[in-house]
Amino acid sequence: MRRWGPKPWWTRRYVSDRTRQIIEQRRHPTEPWLCRRAVLILDHWLRPGDEMAEFGSGRSTRWFAERVGHLTSVEDDPAWHARVTQTLEGLAVDYRLCRDEASYVGWREVSLRRLSTPPWSTVLGATSARTPCSPPCDLVASW
C-alpha cells in the first residue's frame, strides 16, 4: 500500500528545489528538463555546425535539433518514440528506436567512439536503461 503524505527526504531544501524546478519547467515549456543553468550553458555552447548524440528523447530533442547541425537521438520506448517523432518534422534528426538493451548499448558505444573524432561534439544521456548505458547521473561530454 502506498503511503501518502510527507516523505522522510522532503527537507526544506528538497521542497524548495523541486518547487523551483516545477516553476521553471512551466515557464519554459519547450526547454529540456535540465536545471536552468545547464540549459543556459548549452544554449550558448551548442553551435549550428555541431553534431550531437542524445540518449533518451523528449522535449529536449527538438530543442537540441534547433541548435545543432545534426542530432542523433536514441530512444528505447516505442510509444514515446512515436510521440516525439511527431515533433521533429523538418529537422536534421536521425531518430532511432532501440527496443532492446543490446542495440541501445551498441549505439552508445558507436556514439562515444565517434565523439572522440570530429564531427561529433556533444553527447547527452538521460535514459531508462541507465545501468548499462550511462553513469548514474546524466552524461554530458563535449570536445
Image: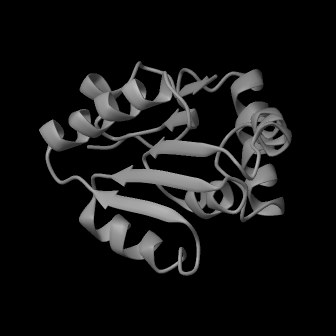
Residue 131: % across, % down: 28, 24
Q: Quadrant of residue 143?
A: top right
Residue located at (73% from left, 37% from top): 35
Residue located at (50% from left, 63% from top): 93
Q: Quadrant of residue 40?
A: top right
Residue 88: % across, % down: 53, 74
Residue 129: % across, % down: 28, 36
Name the residue nearer the viewer: 119 or 70: 119
Name the residue nearer the viewer: 84 or 12: 84
Name the residue nearer the viewer: 49 or 25: 49
Residue located at (45% from left, 52% from top): 72
Q: Quadrant of residue 78?
A: bottom left
Residue 125: % across, % down: 47, 35
Side of 78 relative to 7 (left or right): left
Side of 48 relative to 64 (left or right): right
For residue 121, above or below residue 9: below
